[in-house]
Amino acid sequence: DIQMTQSPSSLSASVGDRVTITCRASQSITNYLNWYQQKPGKAPKLLISAASSLQSGVPARFSGSGSGTDFTLTISSLQPEDFATYYCQQGYSSLFTFGPGTKVDIK
Amino acid sequence: QVQLVESGGTVVQPGRSLRLSCAASGFTFSAYGMHWVRQAPGKGLEWVAVIWYDGSKKYYADSVKGRFTISRDNSQNTVYLQMSSLRAEDTALYYCARGSGSHLDYWGQGTRVTISS
């Protein structure tokens, strides 16, 4: 199975900060990498698919990059509604796997 | 609009069985693969299983393989997760999600399963 790791596991940031979250796959997944946002008590929400394709309605301050094994989610200017946990997920294999998550909270 | 509504979650004893359902609406159900994803209390997301749009292929996480069975009824727009030999570590909120290629674009609100004696 393909293993996913994320770093950091948590971070504290202020409104307006630039935030970067890294996701790494245990083998090449080309660009089959997706990012989700989950707020407490809510279902996950798809933010970015295929490593860099922003979903409709997702603010442009979110961006994704990477290919192969290393990927990045960037929030260019953190907003109050962005405090949440972020997960990466690989869809290269029929057996999907998620990263362990990165919790973004208020400094 | 796309809607996914899970049901069937409850408290069940270890070793017993349980079937979860997910009723879909707002899209052509028979054209999409469907997934189950779970989240243990305070933990991250764990992908559980997928069934192809026509039911022809099914894949499972190693943690549930041989104990869980995913199925679907395209005439009823419903996907199921039959869980057997349940263990304490199966305690989680179970989400169904629509597969769109390699990602999950719509999710339900989840149904809670607690395994406890």
Image: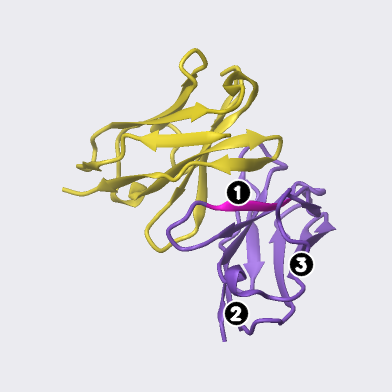
Quadrant of residue B26 within the rendered picture: top right
N-terminal-most mark, 3 or 2: 2
Which one of the lettered chains is coloured yellow? B
A7 relative position to A100: left or right: right
**Label 3: chain letter:** A
Query: On the image, numbered disc 2 is attached to which residue?
Result: A11
User: Residue drawn at (48%, 41%), measured in percent from left and top?
Assistant: B108
Query: On the image, numbered disc 1 is attached to which residue?
Result: A97
User: Residue drawn at (27%, 32%), measured in percent from left and top?
Assistant: B17
Q: How many marks?
A: 3
Q: CA distance from mark 3 to mark 2?
A: 18 Å
Q: CA distance from mark 1 to mark 2?
A: 22 Å
N-terminal-most mark, 1 or 2: 2
Which one of the lettered chains is coloured purple? A
Mark 3, other Cα within 10 Å: few <14 / some 14–19 / many ≥20: few
- Residue B102 is labelled as none
Q: Tell me which segment is drawn in magenta.
A: A44-48
Dots 3 and 1 on the same chain: yes
Of badges 3 and 2, nearer the viewer stands 3
Mark 3–mark 2 CB contact (< 8 Å): no
In the displayed orientation, state which residue is furthest to the bottom.
A107
Query: On the image, numbered disc 3 is attached to which residue?
Result: A61
Q: CA distance from mark 3 to mark 1?
A: 26 Å
Element on which disc 1 rests = strand
In the displayed orientation, state which residue is furthest to the front.
B1
Residue B72 on image: x %, y %:
48, 21
Mark 2, other Cα within 10 Å: few <14 / some 14–19 / many ≥20: some
User: Residue drawn at (60%, 49%), measured in percent from left and top?
Assistant: A97
Quadrant of residue B68 within the rendered picture: top left
Task: Choose between B108 and A70: the one closer to the eye.
Answer: B108
In the displayed orientation, state which residue is furthest to the left.
B117
